Amino acid sequence: MKSRVPAILYLCLLMGSGSLVANEPVVARRMAITFDDLPAQRAQALPEPKILAINEGFVKTLTDQQIPAIGFVNEGKLHVDGALDPARVRLLELWLDAGLELGNHTFSHPELHRTPLEEFQQDLIRGEPTTAAWVQEVAGIQE
């Protein structure tokens, strides 16, 4: 998987980079890559060094290739044994320090089509505090 990530990202960029018809004008297009379920899809099952390596690999590839990206955070995955884990929170700092963006992807990743709207909304709100605080701190925003 590690060696395929740069190739896959490069292929995605090539697909949207130009015209397939010789006489057709080239239209400038921009694309961003998104990553769901940060800090890692199976964060609760993976050892911390593996989660760090996954995030470092993504961030390095994205920055080396100057690919704009947004990482969508499940804040519940920032918790270990019910408490916010500072090491996992620092993983978000990797993304922000590299100039990448973060977004709220709910707290526990409920399935929208199977979760009552009110419950889904509450999970979305619960998924905001840590990510929003980091984004504001890095951007220098004060409330």
Image (tube, helix red, strand yellow):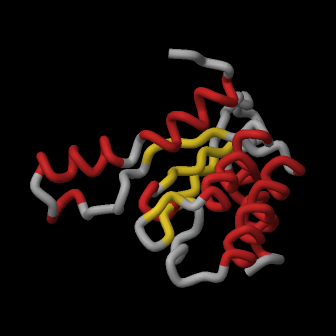
Question: In the picture shown, does residue 59 fall above or below 26?
Answer: below
Task: State the residue at coordinates (59%, 50%).
Answer: 71
Question: In the picture shown, does residue 124 fall above or below 42?
Answer: above
Q: Residue furthest right?
A: 64
111 sits left or right of 25 in the view: left
Task: State the residue at coordinates (69%, 30%).
Answer: 138
Task: State the residue at coordinates (73%, 31%).
Answer: 26
74 sits left or right of 47 in the view: left
Quarter-of-image position of residue 32: top right
Task: State the residue at coordinates (45%, 57%).
Answer: 74
Q: Nearer the viewer, residue 31 or 16?
A: 31
Question: In the picture shown, does residue 41 fall above or below 135?
Answer: below
Q: How far from the left and from the top, in percent, is residue 63?
A: 83, 47
Q: How far from the left and from the top, in percent, is residue 16?
A: 67, 46
Quadrant occupied by the N terminus: bottom right
Q: Nearer the viewer, residue 70 or 104?
A: 104
Q: Nearer the viewer, residue 99 or 43?
A: 43
Q: How far from the left and from the top, in percent, is residue 123?
A: 27, 51
Q: How far from the left and from the top, in percent, is residue 56?
A: 79, 62
50 sits left or right of 104 in the view: right
Q: How many marks?
A: 0
